Structures are given as structure tokens and as C-alpha cells.
Image: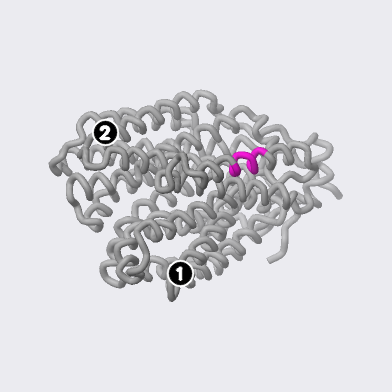
Amino acid sequence: MTTRTSPHADPRHPPGREGRGGLVLLLACGGSFVSLLDVTIANLAVPDLQRDFDDASVADLTWVMSLYAIAFAALLAPAGRLADVVGRRRLYRVGITVFTAASAACAFAPNLATLLAARAVQGLGAAALVPASLAIVLAQIPPARRAAAIGAWSASASLAAALGPSLGGVLVDLFGWRSVFLITVPIGLGLMFLTRVAGDTRSGERTPDLVGSAFLAAGIGTLVLGVTQGSAWGWGDARTIGCVAGGLLLIGASVARAARHPRPGIEVGLWRSRPYAYANVVSFLFGMLLYPWMLLGVLYLTQIWQYSELRAGFAMTHGAVVSAVAGLLVGKYARLVNPRIAVIGGSLVLAGTALWIGLAVPEEPAFAAFWLPSGILLGIGIGAVSTGVSSAGALSVPPVKFAGATGLNLTARQVGGALGIAVLATVLEREAGNGTDGFAQLFFMITGLAVLTAIAGLGLAARPQPAPGPPPQAASTSVTSAREEIPA
């Protein structure tokens, strides 16, 4: 007998898994945590890496961070689409296995070339892991608790950002640079074991267009490479122009192919939902201000206030902790603080705080009077925007599209972050030796981006509703067959 199911209902919850919501949430948050931890924890390893690989320049060593970010950004959108088709749990397992193995390879790398190759593979594993992690929890957590689950998932990323600089500093100081990669291996092994608690669903579609997915991954990777290296190569350099132009052409070709392909590599149809399209714009602008801020704060503390890297890492921690708490609260009280309010309110808090810092930029250390309150306000704003845009994006699509939607939304944030970092590097290079002037300009830039983020937030739905799905009759005949539980 065929069970009729609403087109916007979840894939069916398998018997016996309803009581495992806490473990499922832990699995999802763990995937987000380890992926984002490796973005921030490696930053403080560069001085120690330079001592071990004394024939490498600082520019060479920055590829330890850049290759991870490029691979991560390039594969997010295709991985999200693939998770919807082959199964969220299955892709999560692949992602965490690749990530953990690459982490071990990084820790035991005998030379810089091996380390760089392992970091790229690690980024690929993270790209598979992140959209699958959120999709698992959204598909298995009851609708009434989804906003709180998104808040916890976003908070785990903020917690990773909080722990990354300070944990990286402590590990490098005590055990050397290899320990910052080794630390994620036991976490990854634990998450691999925990995947058994997750249910799995498939959309019933065949494998998405691999050519279009390859175009998209190559385009995003090439574009991010161009904007990341633009300040080092020179914006008029043939390499920079070639990467940016080639990346845009490949992305355009991928989108054009997806618009007419029966099994597109990316779900361009999701952009027909105005709230989801605005969520992508918000995510892009938010990335442009978030990633520069994470680096700008450390540079300001070390270059202007002359903090050590370890002390600067700890000085950044309170803001990220507040961000995690704010994300949890926004998710918990979603009935009062809906995604539109969270994004607009959080963006305005960010704008006001960045403006205050830009106008003041004290040359003498003033942690208690200046940096502590600034970090608290920034943490509130970042936590609210991060959770708000994640909720707006994920909950504006049908459950069967959760992973693809999450991948696209996070890709927008990563590309925006790469562009923001490129602007930051260009301004700092131009203003080198001018003290606080360059930092003030960048804080004003963040102020403007925060205002634009608030304006884009006006397009979000106050209460996100899934984008139109298949007709009810089609859903009634396909849900139980196409989305059936995949045995463990």
C-alpha cells in the first residue's frame, strides 16, 4: 500500500531512530566543527613551519591555508547536490574518512609538497562533509526543532573559530606544527563510528551531471585562486586576470548547462525562490566581512598592539564564544527572532561595532576598555547573522533538497570570503608602514558590507517556507520508493 505524503514533508523517519536526535545533532555539529577548526587552527603554525621548511618562503607557506580554502570552496556546491542523490549519510562517511586520512597525512608529511597535497585533499573531504552534516540533521530532526538544530550547527562552527587560534597556539608552542593536524584525527575516527546513528535518504534521481559539476568546481577553484593570489601576483598580472576570467567563464558555463540539463550538477531552480536567492546574497556579503575580520583582528593585535600570536589567539576567543552562544539562542528562540530579524539585527550590530573600531583604532593596548566589549558585540552580530542566513537558506527549500541548498549557500560565503581576504591583503600592502590608517579603512569597509548585508536581509522571508515541490499526487507515489531508508 502506498502512503500519501505531503510534497514538503520530510523523507520518512525510520523506526527506532526518533530517540537518537541528540546523537544525530552531535554527528552534524561534529562535521561542522572539524571542518571549520582546520580553517583557523593552522594559521598559527606558519612560523613553526618556516623553521622546519627553511627553504620555503612565507608566500609558499600561505598555500597551506589557501589550498584548503580553494578545494573546500570548489567542491561545496557539487557535494551538496551529490548528497541529495547518493545519500547524506553515505557522503558524510566518505567526507569524514577522506578528511581524517588527509589530516594524518598532513601531520606526518615529510616535505612541504606532501603537506600541500594533503591539505588540498583535506579540503575536498571537508567539502563533502559540511553540506551532508547539516542535511542529515535537518532530514531527521522534527520540523519544530529544526531552527534550534541549525543554531547548534552554526554554533559549532563558531566554537571551532573560537578554539582554533588559541588551541593552535598552544599546540604549536608545546608540540610543534604537526600537532595542529593530528588533533583532528581522533575526532574524525569518533565521527566515523557515530555515523551509524544517522538515517539516510536518496532523492531517487540518477547521478547528477558530472561535466557540469566539474566545470563548477574548476571555475570556483580558479576564481578563488585568482582573488586569493591577486595581491601577491599583482591585479594586472596575466595569471590573476587569467584565473579570474577563466573562473567566471567556467562558472557561467556550468550554470548555463545546469539550466537545461535533466540532472543538473547544481540546483539552479532553487534560485527561483526569492528568499533562497536573497539568502545566497546575504551569505556572499557576510563571507566578505567575516573572513577579513577573523584575520584583521589577529593582525591588528600583533602588529599594532604587539601581542604575541598566542596572546592574540586568546584575545580573539571571547568574541567567537559569544558568537556560538548567540547562534544557539537565535535557534532556540526562533519563534521570536526569525531569520530576517536575526540577519538584519545582527548586521546592524556588526556595522555599528566596526564603525566604532574604525573611528577609534587605539595604538596603545586597551583590552578591557576597548577590545573586550568590541568582541562581545561582534560575537553577537556574527552569531545572529550566521544562524539566521543558514536557517533562511535551508528552510526555504523542500527537505529532499537540504544538502544541495546548503552547499550552494556555503559556496557563496566561501567565495565572498576569498574576495574579502583579497581586498584586505591589497589594502594592507598599500598602507604598509602607515600605522592604524590601513586598519581603519578596512574596518570602514566591513561597516559598509554589514550595512549591505542588512539591506539584503530585507528580502528574506520572515518565516521560511519550502520552495514549491512536486505535485501531491507525484509525491504520494514516489516518496516511499525514491526516498526509502538505506540499510546501515
**Residue 171 visible to an observer of this rendering:** no
Seen at 51% across and 68% down, the residue is 102
Amino acid type for the residue under numbered disc 1 = Cys
Q: Quadrant of residue 471?
A: top right
* Magenta-tinted stretch: 246-252
- State the mark number for residue 106: 1
Label 1 Cα crowd, 10 Å radius (few <14 / some 14-19 / many 20+) = many
Prevalent SS, magenta region: helix
Q: How is the image coloured?
A: one colour
* Element assignment for label 1: helix
Give 451 or 29, whichever is nearer the viewer. 451
Seen at 21% across and 56% down, the residue is 308
Seen at 44% across and 58% down, the residue is 63
Residue 158 image position (x, y, % from top left): 40, 48
Give 192 or 478, whichever is nearer the viewer. 192
Is 89 magenta? The answer is: no
Residue 36 image position (x, y, % from top left): 45, 54
- State the mark number for residue 440: 2
Residue 325 image position (x, y, % from top left): 37, 45
Farthest residue, direction left: 364
* Element assignment for label 2: helix
Farthest residue, direction right: 1
Q: Quadrant of residue 271?
A: top right
Q: Is residue 177 above or below residue 381?
A: below
Is 248 magenta? The answer is: yes
N-terminal of the pair, mark 1 or mark 2, is 1
Amino acid type for the residue under numbered disc 2 = Ala
Q: Are marks 1 and 2 in contact (CB under 8 Å)?
A: no
